[in-house]
Amino acid sequence: MVKSSNPSGSIIIFAYLVVYIVWGSTFFFIEKALHAFPPFVLGSIRFIIAGSLLMFYCWVKGYKIYIKSAVKDAALVGFLLLFVDMAAIIWSEQYISSAIVSILSAATAIWFIILDKPKWKENFSSIPTLLGLILGFLGVVMLFAEQIFGASANDGDNDKKLTAMIVMTVGTIGWTVGSLISKYNKKSENKKSAEPNAVKEPEEDLNVMVKTAWQMVVAGIAFTTVALLNGEYKNFEFNSVPLEYWGAMVYLALLGSILAFSCYIFLLQYRPATEVSTYAYVNPIVALILVHFFTDHVVSRMQIIGLAVVLFSVLLMNWNLYRDSSIIKNYKRRRKIRKLRHMAPKSSIPRIVEVAEFGQKKTKKPKENPEKGSSSSESTNTDKNKGKSFDQEFYD
């Protein structure tokens, strides 16, 4: 839901920059931190820090911290979104470039189309969606082929790279399943509350920040459990980690998990969701740039082409959503008025606006009273006055 009173433009721009750049850079900083932290220890420390700090912030703000049903749902979603998906990302970046991981992460839209059963009829009857689905699979296949048969395939780690890409793909499926569970759980709750015969009792729910804090805590516990069971914590020495890698850890926990997510929630409150979702197109580009300039990985032409194909496929799969957004509708309406303005005299512009707005708002016309002959002349004079004021405002 978009609020009517928008904050200043500088705050909006700052929030977008954080979501675009910080979230895009987390892939790079994960790869950097893996030089000193084992994968599950990395996830454990990151989400324990982020979850604890975010929970403390919610407690200071006075938010309710615990509701059994809400925490249970948050735990399931957090396990799928932040543990399964992030574990796949962190583990995969041991063997493949963070740029490849970011592109495969952007291809999550493929699984949303395939696994969102209630929207199958809508999705699979849309030509742009089907084309985007085909292109998305093509882009992923190109990335697989580049890693296995490309110039970097001669280092003898083909099996590990293939395994890492499969694990990464499974992680994106986990992210999709968690997102769909969260989506339809919320819809079912809204549907029950809207039933006319339902007992309308106010149901308590947790603030979205509290739910996210619980998701991070659950992910941190899951990472810690795995790290203890597989011996990563046993062989890990905190004192042996150089300061720069602790810096990468702090960046991931504070900026990547807390600040970027807070900006994302902030933008959803004040900007259309279709506009905010553009971070999915920018994040892989940021990751690719950082890999090219600050790592030893070679960004090949096939990777760039694969990125372009995947991002274009995501655009096509979201085409109907963007087409129906208020931003596009308002743009088309302004363009129509601008075009008609040059084809008609100034006195007809109010009529052009009326035609452009036809069908958007249905107003009942008052019945004409034949006994009052002056009503038509009065309405004509009123229209003229409105026309003059609109002309003046329009051309100013």
Image (cartoon, rainbow, N blue to C red):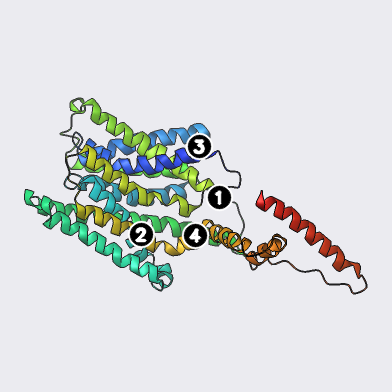
Residue 345 seen by the camera:
yes
Image coordinates of residue 10 in percent, x first then y, are 50, 37
Which amino acid lies under the numbered mark 1 shown in the image of this protein? Val
Say whether marks 4 and 1 touch (CB < 8 Å).
Answer: no
Q: Say whether disc 1 or disc 2 marks the residue closer to the N-terminus.
A: 1
Report the residue at 46% width, 61% height from top.
Answer: 321
Q: In this orientation, which residue lies closer to the viewer: 263 or 146? A: 146
Q: Which residue is mark 3?
A: 10
Residues packed near mark 3 inside 10 Å, few (<14), some (14 to 19) or many (20 plus): few
Image coordinates of residue 193 in percent, x first then y, are 57, 59
Which amino acid lies under the numbered mark 4 shown in the image of this protein? Lys
Q: Which mark is residue 187?
A: 4
Which amino acid lies under the numbered mark 3 shown in the image of this protein? Ser
**How much space separates mark 4 and mark 1, taking CA atoms?**
18 Å
Residues packed near mark 4 inside 10 Å, few (<14), some (14 to 19) or many (20 plus): few
The secondary element bearing badge 3 is classed as helix
Q: Is residue 227 left or right of residue 199?
A: left
Q: Which mark is residue 314?
A: 2
**How much space separates mark 2 and mark 4, taking CA atoms?**
24 Å
Residues packed near mark 2 inside 10 Å, few (<14), some (14 to 19) or many (20 plus): many
Q: Say whether disc 2 or disc 3 marks the residue closer to the N-terminus.
A: 3
Instruction: Report the mark closest to the observer, 1 or 2.
Output: 2
Q: Is residue 23 left or right of residue 63?
A: left
Say whether marks 2 and 3 touch (CB < 8 Å).
Answer: no
Q: Say whether disc 2 or disc 4 marks the residue closer to the N-terminus.
A: 4
Q: Say whether disc 3 or disc 1 marks the residue closer to the N-terminus.
A: 1
The secondary element bearing badge 1 is classed as loop
The secondary element bearing badge 2 is classed as helix
The secondary element bearing badge 4 is classed as helix
Q: Which mark is residue 2?
A: 1
